[in-house]
Amino acid sequence: MFGRQTSGSVLCAYCGKLVGVRDEVCWNCGRRNPGMWGFGPVLRRLGYNLGFVPVLIWGCVALYLATLMADPRGVSVRGLSILAPSPRSLFMFGASGAIPVFDYDRWWTLLSAGWLHGSLLHIGINMLWIRQLAPAAAELYGSPRMVIIYCMSSITGFLLTSITGLIFGPVPILGGAQFTVGASAPIFGLLGAMVHYGRRGGSRYIGSQALYYAVIVFVFGVVMPGVDNYAHIGGFLGGYAIAKWLDPLQPERVIHLIAAVVLLLITAASILASLLAGRFP
């Protein structure tokens, strides 16, 4: 099931047309190594069936349940914050922000915070966005590059909000987050990548739709209290920059797959590091 195919035909990893497993160039789309060195069928299964999207969704759900169970007495059940894990629990699992990053030197939380959520509504909305955007980004960039964009935009999003939280403190509008979690920073990174795809020449419609969604959600965040807008901005800018560096119109390379696996391993290690570090402010 997961072995390398060395002969016969496979579907092009980019356009889906039938090509020889050893073909250097796809006859339809012109991409090099359309069979991904014989690993095309495996990567297609991992990318869309058993790969990052379901791992991300179920991983976020499992961690959300774990944060509830870690401190059941601290769970909030009021208003929009229904079933909200306690700050103690979120800190223990890897929440980010000015306090964890700068006061406690928990730099790894720039990755771990993107897998944690602050309420049932929070995780529900973010998982719906991931279910829509991540497969679409994987179609445009390929699964490995989509993973790179997702992870790196988590870093840029939470880094920006942590820095502004340090500089301005909890000042309304100007201030960043003292304490923050959520997948919305990397979600905005995927939107930024789609905007770049449209500007690069892939599809203007996709780019304009992604920009429209980003603006709408950002305006909603400005109006609604408790939304980490700096994380959204940092995620969007990071996703756009990483997407520009990766260039969606160029073929994927093995190094992209290696980088994606390394980033996922580092992300898992960041959550483990948070649990081992302990300490609550």
Image (cartoon, helix red, strand yellow):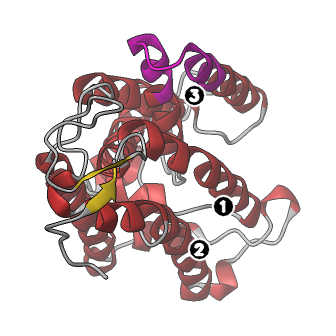
At a point 49% along the width and 73% down the height, the residue shown is 59
On the image, which quarter does residue 234 sit in?
Answer: top left
- Disc 2 packing (10 Å; few <14; some 14–19; many ≥20): some
Across and down, in percent, residue 132 comes to 64, 48
Neighbours of disc 3 within 10 Å: few (<14), some (14-19), many (20+): few
Pick the quarter of the image with the C terminus.
bottom left
For the residue pair 227 and 238, the one nearer the viewer reads as 238
User: Identity of the amino acid at label 2?
Assistant: Val
Relative to 149, 26 lies left or right: left
Q: Which residue is mark 1?
A: 123
Closer to the camera in the image, 128 or 82: 128
Q: Quadrant of residue 61?
A: bottom right
Secondary element under disc 1, as helix, strand or loop, is helix
Q: List the residue tagged with mark 2.
A: 61
Q: Is residue 108 left or right of residue 45?
A: left
Of residues 129 and 276, which is closer to you in this image?
129
| Cα gap from disc 3 to disc 1, whole angstroms | 26 Å
Classify 260 as above or below 233. below
In this picture, is 94 found above or below 126?
A: below
Q: Amino acid at mark 3?
A: Val
Residue 211 in the image: state x and y as whole percent: 60, 20
Numbered disc in front, either 3 or 1: 1
**Residue 58 percent location from the top left of the image:** 54, 74
Residue 62 colored in magenta in the image: no
Q: Residue at x 49, y 61 (%)?
A: 53
Circle 3 is placed at which residue position?
Answer: 171
Residue 197 at least partly seen: yes
Is 92 positioned to the left or the right of 257 in the image? right
Mark 3 residue element: loop
Nearest the camera: 256 or 64?
256
